[in-house]
Image: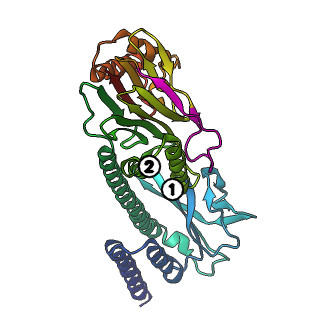
Amino acid sequence: MAHHERLEAKIRQRDFKLNALLDVTRAINSNAPVEELLAQYERVLRDQLSIEKLALYTHDEKWRCLLQYGLADEPLQEITDASFFSGKGETRLQTATSQESFDLTIPVTQDGVAIAYVLVGDIGEQEIRISPVIKHMRFIQTLTNVLVVAIENKKLQSERLRQAQVKRELELAAEMQAILLPGQLPKNEFYDVSAIYKAHQQVGGDYYDFIELNDHEVLFCMADVSGKGVSAAFLMANFQAYLRALFTYSAFELEQAVRELNDQVMHTAMGEKYITLFIAKYHRTSRRLEYINCGHNPPVMADINGYTQLLKLGTIGLGMFEELTKLSKGEVIVPPGSWIVCYTDGLVEMEDERCEQFGVERLEQLMLAFPDSTASHLNEIILQSIHEFKGDMPFVDDLAILTCRFF
């Protein structure tokens, strides 16, 4: 009779374990939250199997405590492999103020790599012959494996969704940025304009523009947002819209426009980012160029006689301070046939394998070496030169070039 009862007890225990695994699997398939899965796991081990204390650690860059109960002291939330160790038939976990002893450490592996450790034990002396920890070790390992793999899969799925969202955001930002940049630049009897833009990431913070204000004046600019990525692209989109509105609907002088732009950047970026800007207005009849350089890499102006100058005058970057206390406007006469090349720091700060920068002098030499080139051809020459210079070194920043030839 006793044998028959023990057999029935084993059958009930087996059925319970199978049903417990089935219930957990159903919860996983129904996409139950992690908290619900852990609560179900704890009920099975604590209430049904009488596992009196437990600490479950999973690996997510560090070993982190996912679940614990029955411990005299709070365990460390983050541990290293050396924080718990085995010896003399037991495992000890170094907690915040003491060492907690466990009867067994059960590793959970995936592809031969430990992804979790479950530390289990009895609180006091067992009156029964076999400790539940030992008796149910295989089942604990199986149930923990199912649970931890499901949680890992949830993390992977969440990461895939996050990456897909980021990818879509980048695609939208790239599309937006492509719309911001002028699709067609003029090439006529007055000027020949061409541009190159290569984003280091999918989207960047560089911007250039060339705007015909009226029959006699044009405005052109080059700008660079501190930082990269989507936030830089959105800040630049706001900046571009505001800049175009200033000069499309009002006859702003450069000094006033720059102060308005500084206010706008301060309001939009709230001091977290700034924008360097070179902005210039050219009058075709007088050939007078007015410009303000707001902390940007100074464009190079070269005439047909081999004379070059850097357009440096201006002020600090926009969005650095609420007030632009020192602001200087530069004025130059542009002789016929002159070049002006605007660029971002991704050009002149490009390094070769010896950590030498491309620099402004190389750009000046290229401009002087091809005085009769078209703007697009000169850009191709500059781009080829930068590729030859850097060798196998990667691009580490956005690269933008706006080349203007004035006839």
Circle 1 residues within 10 Å: few <14, some 14–19, many ≥20? some
Disc 1 designates what residue? 268
Res. 326 visible in picture: yes
User: On screen, 120 above or below 400?
Assistant: below
Task: Pick out the residue farthest to the right.
Answer: 97
Q: Is residue 113 left or right of residue 121?
A: left
Which mark is on residue 231? Answer: none
Residue 373 screen position, x and y as percent: 29, 15
Stretch in magenta = 314-334
Could you tell me which residue is drawn at 67 percent across and 77 percent down? 125
Task: From the viewer's side, name the closer residue of 364 and 155.
Answer: 364
Tell me the quadrant of the picture where the C terminus can be found.
top left
Which mark is on residue 239? Answer: 2
Q: Secondary structure at mark 1?
A: helix
User: On screen, 247 above or below 149?
Assistant: above
Q: Give the overall secondary structure of the magenta segment.
A: loop
Task: From the viewer's side, name the closer residue of 147 and 124.
Answer: 147
Residue 320 screen position, x and y as percent: 60, 46
Q: Which kind of residue does numbered mark 1 sit on?
A: Thr
Task: From the viewer's side, name the closer residue of 281 and 120.
Answer: 281
Res. 298 visible in picture: no
Kindly report the distance in space between the C-alpha atoms of the residues bearing marks 1 and 2.
9 Å
Q: How is the image coloured?
A: rainbow
Could you tell me which residue is drawn at 64 percent across and 50 percent down? 82
Residue 296 screen position, x and y as percent: 52, 33
- Of marks 1 and 2, which one's residue comes earlier in the chain? 2
Q: Which kind of residue does numbered mark 2 sit on?
A: Phe
- Answer whether labels 1 and 2 touch (C-beta < 8 Å): yes
Tell me the quadrant of the picture where the N terminus can be found.
bottom left
Circle 2 residues within 10 Å: few <14, some 14–19, many ≥20? many
User: On screen, 92 above or below 139?
Assistant: above
